[in-house]
Amino acid sequence: MEYILKNGIVYDPVNEINGEKKDVMFRDGKIVNSVSDSAKILDVTDKLVMPAGVDVHCHLAGPKLCVGRLYRPEDERKGVKPKTDITRAETGFSIPSCPATGYRFSRMGYGTVVEAAVPPLEAKHTHEEIIAIPNIDIPPLTLFGNNWFVMQFAKEGNIEDLAAFVSAWLKITKGYGVKIVNPCGSEAWGWGGNVHGIDDPAPYWDVTAREVIRALAQANEMLGLPHSIHVHPNDLGHPGNFPTTINTIDCMKDIKKNSEYRNQTIHLTHAQFHCYEGTSWRDVTSGAQPVADYINKNDHVTMDLGAVTLDETTTMTADGPMEYDLYELTGLKWANKDIELETASGLVPFIYSGRNPVHSLQWAIGLELALMVENPWQVALTTDSPNAGPFIRYPRVISWLMSNKRRMEMMDNKEVHGWAAKKSALATLDREYDFYDIATITRAAPSKIYGFEDRGNLSVGSLADIAVYDLEPNNFDPTVNAAAVENAFSNALYTIKDGEILVKDGEVVKVVSSNHVHTEVQGFEDQEKRILEQIMPMFNKYYTVKFENYIVHDHYAEPSTVYKVNASK
Amino acid sequence: MAYEEPVKDYDKIVENCTCAFCGSNCDDLDILVKDNHVAGVRHACRLGASKIMEDEDQRLLVPMVRDENGELVEVDWDTALDKAAELIAGSIRPVFYGWSETSIEAMKPGLELTELVGAVIDNQATICHGPTVQAVQNVGYPLMTLGEVKNRADMLVYTGSNPMNAHPRHLSRYTTYPKGFFRRRGRFDRTLVTWDPKFSDTAKLSDIWVPFEENGDYGFCNAIRAVLKGKELKQDVISGIPKEDIYELTEKMKNTKFGALFFGLGLTHTLSKQRNIDIAIQLVQDLNKYTKWVLLPMRGHFNVNGFNIFMSYEMGFPYGVDFSRGYPRYMIGETTTIDLLNRRECDVFMVIAADPGAHFPGGALAHLANIPVIQIDIHWGPSTEMADVVLPGTFIGVETAGTSYRMDSVPLYMKKAIDPPETCREDEWIVNELLQRVKNIKEASK
Amino acid sequence: MTYIEKPSISNVVKFDDPDVTQVKKLKVMLNTGTDIYQGACKKRGSTLKDEYRKVAGVCYMDPKDMARLGVGNWESILVKSDWGEVVCYAAHSRDAPHEGMIFIPKGPWANVVVSPETYCCSDPTYKGIKATVEKSDKEVLLMADLMRDVYKKYVKEGEETEELPSLGESPVYKKIRSQ
């Protein structure tokens, strides 16, 4: 089927197209140069056209989500929608059911969403949920930061074996890249402890976060994976944690990149949670400036925001000890899920409120980071959904970034607590994102960060993943119309995925299966085989499942998009 | 039992099969196959082995429909499926119950059928760990995978459960006996504690047995919590246990390195129901102020947890989900099976991979005598005595492969060892057929 | 360390125990649940057989309570609760002592006497039911007969279940093909 999207105002930062009126053509799921006369015309004259959104970090499929859904029916009862002829019923607000997750991303014009944390032992569960989520491609990141084998290799400084292990485990879990969460801290949580800073060793293993991060980064680059290591540093959510954040990025400085498309060697995720100055929640202030300064001076790092949206939500992370701290702080119901030999995780519901001083400061820090980091190619928009807010609030964050007026209004009208203005620099930042910048932080930069050459842009040959919004950039001032911006980005005029129209006028009109997106390293098979043989005695002794039943069988990851990587040494 | 010679007469061994009995889902079974029959099974416990070495006399092999005399009559698949589809399509308050002994793959069309006709879908959690789910929704859920316990735990508490009878390999494969990474001497490095009014088979193996009185669970946990919070116990004996013993036990629990609490239906089936679990969970949460503690409900069927997980990710609610209004509703005590039967509300009952005849209280079962019952199962059981349409399924994990979730939510792909009997059909196929046939009936009547 | 000394298990019902006075009816607390024999028999699928009656149609009692009632192992007793009454075998419990408590493994026999009341909590009350036990001269029914006797789903009006022939220990249905 051929289509021509006519006369839209196109923003495609990868191709440096900044608000040009032009046609976008596609055939058989790919963007093309020209189409025949029989192409179907979609008239989008003067409307905002972008590649479909790419989300770098979201918790949307897997065991943690399921614990959340199971233990928070109060959240599921929000956002209930009856079934239609096309869609199934929807439930949930911060942790929507799988079908609802797919529909909602699709309505916002998204095409690819990364699932940010997959414990290998339960990777099948993540893939089962991906099967249940329609309409978006999902690359899952596999957790490595507290894996016993990884810690052992890191301790020995055995990078080649570690690379072989990572390569094998990405295949076993059908994962896309390397996720590191509170390295060594989640292992310490196995004993109810934590580590502080990057030089505090894990109990027994006697290896530090610095060693683990560096080793995994070196292995990542040895394999030449399309994405860099994806790091949730130590000390998340602790006042005074910003030096840990800077140390984490800085310890990567000398590691050489080995992948063409991306620029970074480390991706710092949900940066907002890692930029606090002070010693306690009483004297906490924003630590965004030093972190942003560092990022502005260094191009080996990218980050995503983790912007707080001031909603009642559900926090969930593989950072087990942090969730227990949060439980002690709030007293809200605490769930925990430790995974043998691999990781920990926890959940606590959280009620962010504009009346609360700390939450308001967190809100300010998320926005500060976006406004302080000068190069939008180093920034990706996230809310670490659902941790700082559910993903359906992305359009609201966009509206804040585009309108200084709206931000000032919120601080002046006491929609947020005085701490937002007093303890951060947000009130002094009058930078406003334009549509080109928004397209960068929600499309172009994310796809570059992940090494996706075939999406996040409208280049010929790329996937026909396109979003059209009901805004006319040439007749519209986003700096004074925050509500209209939010509304438009929440309800795409068209969402096109692989050349198929999935959303029209903000409603899902077609449901398709999601692709499981994963990498497959080639040329490392011998090393993988050797390493598997080497670790198998330990695997058999200390796991409670057989290796044969541990791997994710192919049928759990269908349909799939596989990015083949040539391990170049 | 008399000594039996090991089975030597077999064609092949299928290794690493997953046991389709209890929530332990042991995935190390070796099934010995001879002429497409199970000749023997290695590593399974008494329960697992009994199920895999099934009683072939009572295997449901052919579809059956009751005639006007109330006798079951063998029919062909089309007739049986049409009859079942007709009953479902014509009902106003259907309940689809069971699912815990089948695969996730079979649940998928089952949910689709539920959505199509606006039925209630529910599983065995409704009569076993339902209160646990409610307690989890009240206070939280600090759990772990069983390997964490194997590798780290030095204290294990079993309460309201008797794993030596219900999950026979739980102690030997996961918690108490195995040599773990940080517990190299296995059993010798661990303290096993049983809280149970009865001197159960598990209590007999334990280092410490705390025989609190019947219905004393809440008071006992409450006392430990009080001691943990530095309070003094005012009574000399609480729930039948002297207060000195409670102090001593609390101190021991505080001073372990890694403790794990396992609880079963002893807590959920007594009068305080979810309140018992509430306080047990809160106790574990409190203990984490001092040291590491986790807990896990001892789930009964091999996929009872799987259904709760499946429903949670598909529809946001774990069990007892009512689609009669076109969107999912979950209201415990209202949209749950026993309550629907007690209120005589349901008008067609489909049971798949479950046996309400053996497990529902008589007061609820009495309603099944008033309404048509469709059964999908592998054996002739008490429910067959009340079934109007019987559809013979296949044996997941032996004859058919499929996905299940262990009690600690670890997903496993259960492979098959032999081919199913020719006349039986996979659950997934049966449910899919019902779905298509009900769709056709609905289309035709439009 | 044990909080209360672990008991030695009495395997014998001593009718001449001097502490025991005979009674006609015993007030007890009924618990149900699984045990390994019931579980193995049920999941093997042997529910129609005598074997199932022996593992699930059985009421495990403290030997002293049995002495009080004057029943020996495998003699019939009648268990009554607010919800119904059922005849099962008496057998001494290997978890004794627990005077005043009886245990019937879950199954069709236990179902008759447990409470369907969920107290709005989805889960019936299977444990801690007040019940009475007395001696009975009736035979414990096989599973199929019990289901027919209790629920009468396919019993015609005017038929007395007690007078009908037993359904026996194997499946009863009309076959198409002669086998």
Image (cartoon, rainbow, N blue to C red):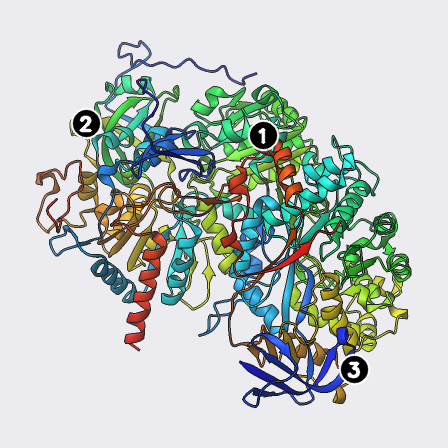
Query: Residue A541 — which label?
Result: 1
Where residue A282 appears, as percent x and y from the top left, is: 85, 51
Amino acid beneath label 2: Ser
- Secondary structure beneath disc 2? loop
Q: Amino acid at mark 3?
A: Val
Q: Which of labels 2 and 3 is toward the front? A: 3
Dots 2, 1 in contact, CB < 8 A: no
Sort mark 1 into few (<14), some (14-19) or many (20+) by Cα contacts within 10 Å. some
Q: Quadrant of the C terminus of chain C?
A: top left
Q: Find residue B124 and name its label.
A: none
Query: Do tag 1 and tag 3 residues touch (Cβ < 8 Å)?
Result: no
Q: Quick one: B272 or A562, which is closer to the camera?
A: A562
Q: Is residue B147 left or right of residue C89?
A: right
Disc 2 crowd, CA 10 A, few/some/many (<14, 14-19, 20+): some
**Labels 2 and 3 share a subunit:** no
**Is A199 on the left-hand or right-hand side of A153?**
right
In the depicted structure, whether residue C27 falls above or below residue A64: above
Circle 3 is placed at which residue position?
Answer: A480
Estimate the x, y position of residue A435 in percent, counting from the top left: 76, 78
- The subunit letter for the residue under badge 3 reads A
Front-lying residue, C94 or B114: B114
